[in-house]
Amino acid sequence: MFQGIWIDKEDGQYRADVRGINKEQLPEGDVLVRVSHSTLNYKDALAITGASPVVRQFPMVPGIDFAGVVETSSHPDYKSGDSVVLNGWGVGEKHWGGLAEFARVSGDWLVPLQAPFTLRQAMAIGTAGYTAMLCVLALERHGVTPASGPVVVTGAAGGVGSVAVAVLAQLGYEVSAVTGRPEQADFLKRLGARHIVERAGLSAPGKPLAREQWAGAIDVAGGHVLANVCAAMRYRGVVAACGLASGMDFPATVAPFILRGVTLAGVDSVMAPRADRLQAWQRLARDLDPALLESLAQDATLADALTLAPQMLEGKVRGRVVVSVRG
Ligand code: NDP
């Protein structure tokens, strides 16, 4: 038996608790991993609370990412004792995930732990941080450099946002951090943000085009926030959109795209090709200051994750939550 978070729907009642799980119940897969750390991502909070239909089959062990050590493997790329990381691939949604002491998965979904990260550091980054780096890479792919002009990050005090601010500042960008929590201004400045922008100024319906401010943007919010960010991009600016913390809709006009040549680049971490994953993890090792990473991470147990999940959906959790699955 091992400990894990267990989500079930019995008699229409959605429940998540920590319980003992029999190893024989683990799903099929060619690699068995002894999980060391997982994390609480926004999607995990949706899964644990049932606020959105993230879980596709029941019962489910949530956790869209994990870091751990291979216990047994029949996959050619992995052997017992290898340190590995998993992000996405539907794990924690339709295949049992990382918020448990063991996970059995396809070896094709794993990547080796990137040096010099420890297993805990890899999960302090987690899917949120790896997605932040995919967003940075999307900006670079579309030609944005620190010389292009200032960049903006929305949801800056959250998981994706805080890593994005730290990485962009380290790369030399002038970063504006959008937050609904002005009390986090000092935290964001320590991560490297030059300017703090109040979220309220971007949350209401805005004009099709606004004053040109930013050359690049990383948006985790969607909704009016994304529409207003697009409207305030400089000529040929680039917006990497990865989230829906504000909403799934996109109440915008085409004006920024057809009059200013703005590019809207979508970023998905779940099905991203292996080469992109490896590149993102290598760049995180190069461009994320380990001291800043430590400052934006908090530690939690499996039981804590249950308590923190609703708080995360209310936008009350700062930075990243690292879950030590062994307590
Ligand atoms: P967090 O909960 O850690 O952070 C989200 C942040 O968004 C909050 O901290 C808050 O920041 C801000 N926020 C909250 N509510 C609103 C609102 N109504 N309007 C605008 N901003 C708001 O989540 P993550 O950083 O882990 O994830 C952020 C988003 O990115 C989620 O929607 C998630 O699903 C998505 N995501 C997508 C991925 C992909 O593959 N495309 C991968 C990972 C995440 P503040 O208080 O500073 O304003």
Image (spheres, rainbow, N blue to C red):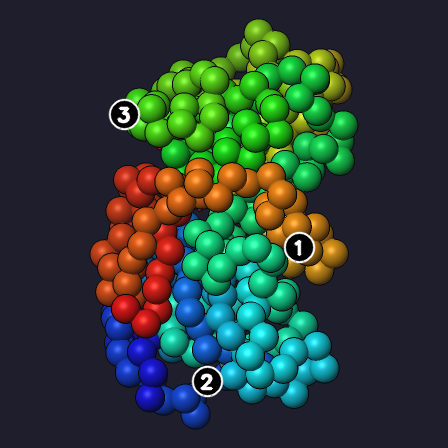
Kindly report the distance in space between the C-alpha atoms of the residues bearing marks 2 and 1: 26 Å
Q: CA distance from mark 2 to mark 3?
A: 43 Å
Q: Earlier in the sequence, mark 2 or mark 3?
A: 2
Label 1 amino acid? Arg
Specify the label residue 10 is tagged with. none
- The structure residue drawn at horizontal position 63% and vertical position 65%, both measured from the top left corner, is 111
Residue 326: image quadrant is bottom left
Residue 222 appearing in the image = no
The amino acid type found where label 3 is placed reads Glu
* Marked residue nearer the N-terminal end (2 or 1): 2
Residue identified by numbered label 2: 26
SS of the residue under disc 2: loop
Q: Is residue 67 above or below residue 129?
A: below
* Left or right, residue 55 beside residue 262: left
Q: CA distance from mark 1 to mark 3?
A: 34 Å
What quarter of the picture does the C terminus occupy? bottom left
| Callout 2–callout 3 Cβ contact below 8 Å | no
Q: Residue at x 63, y 82 (%)?
A: 79
The residue singled out by tag 1 in the image is 277
Q: Which residue is mark 3?
A: 183
